[in-house]
Amino acid sequence: MSNKKRILLVDDEGKFVVALKIRLEKSGYQVSQAYDGEEALSKARSEDPDLIILDLMLPKVDGFMICSLLKKDDRYKHIPIIICSSRIREEDKELGRKVGADAYITKPFDSQDLMDTIKRLLSGNKPS
C-alpha cells in the first residue's frame, strides 16, 4: 500500500526508535529511521518523507542544524518537523521555533499527544 504517509524518525537511541517505530507502523505509517545527523539529512533529501520526527542531540550534525538546513531549502521546507527531545529549557524550544520546527515535544512524552500532533501536521494544520 503506497498511499501510506511516510515518516522519517531520527534519534540515536535505538530502543526509543524501535518502540516508536512499532507504534507508528501500528497506526498505519510507513517509517524509516536515521541514527545520526548526516544520515538524517541524506534520507530526508532522498526519501522526501511526509513528516520528520527529530531528536536534537545527535552524532555528527545536531537536530537544530538539520531542521534549519531543511527549512531553508525550497525543496524540503514543506516537510513538517516535530522536534522530540529531552531538552526542556525554554531557550531550546525558542531555538526550535526559530529554525522552523512545526512542533516541539519533550521526552518523556504522552504517545497520544505525539500521534495527535502527527495527525494534525499531516492534515496541513499548523499550530496557531
Image (cartoon, rainbow, N blue to C red):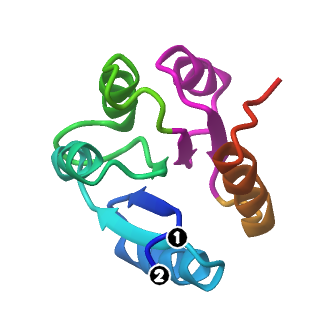
Q: Is residue 124 above or below residue 97?
A: below
Q: Is residue 117 above or below residue 26?
A: above
Give residue 98's position: percent from left, percent from top: 53, 14
Label 2: element kind: loop
Q: Is residue 19 left or right of residue 125?
A: left
Label 1: element kind: loop
Mark 2 is surrounded, within 10 Å at the Cα level, by few (under 14), some (14 to 19) or many (20 or more) other residues, namely few
Q: What whole-number distance in Å separates the C-alpha atoms at marks 2 and 1?
A: 6 Å
Residue name at image x 73 percent, y 31 percent = 126
Would you say the residues marked 2 and 1 are in contact, meaning their CB atoms lie under 8 Å apart? yes
Identify which residue, 104 or 3, lies in the foreground. Answer: 3
Identify which residue, 92 or 101, lies in the foreground. Answer: 101
Residue name at image x 27 percent, y 54 percent = 47
Which corner quadrant holds the C terminus? top right
Q: Is residue 18 left or right of residue 113?
A: left
Residue name at image x 35 percent, y 16 percent = 72
Give residue 38's position: percent from left, percent from top: 16, 45
Q: Is residue 41 left or right of residue 28?
A: left
Residue type at tag 2: Met
Mark 1 is surrounded, within 10 Å at the Cα level, by few (under 14), some (14 to 19) or many (20 or more) other residues, namely few
Give residue 112's position: percent from left, percent from top: 79, 66
Residue name at image x 59 percent, y 20 percent = 97
Query: Magenta includes 92?
Result: yes
Identify which residue, 120 or 109, lies in the foreground. Answer: 120
Q: What residue sits right under mark 1 in the picture?
A: 4
Q: Which residues are magenta?
A: 80-107
Q: What residue sits right under mark 2 in the picture?
A: 1
Query: Magenta includes 103?
Result: yes
Give residue 29's position: percent from left, percent from top: 55, 72
Residue type at tag 1: Lys
**What's the mark number on residue 27?**
none
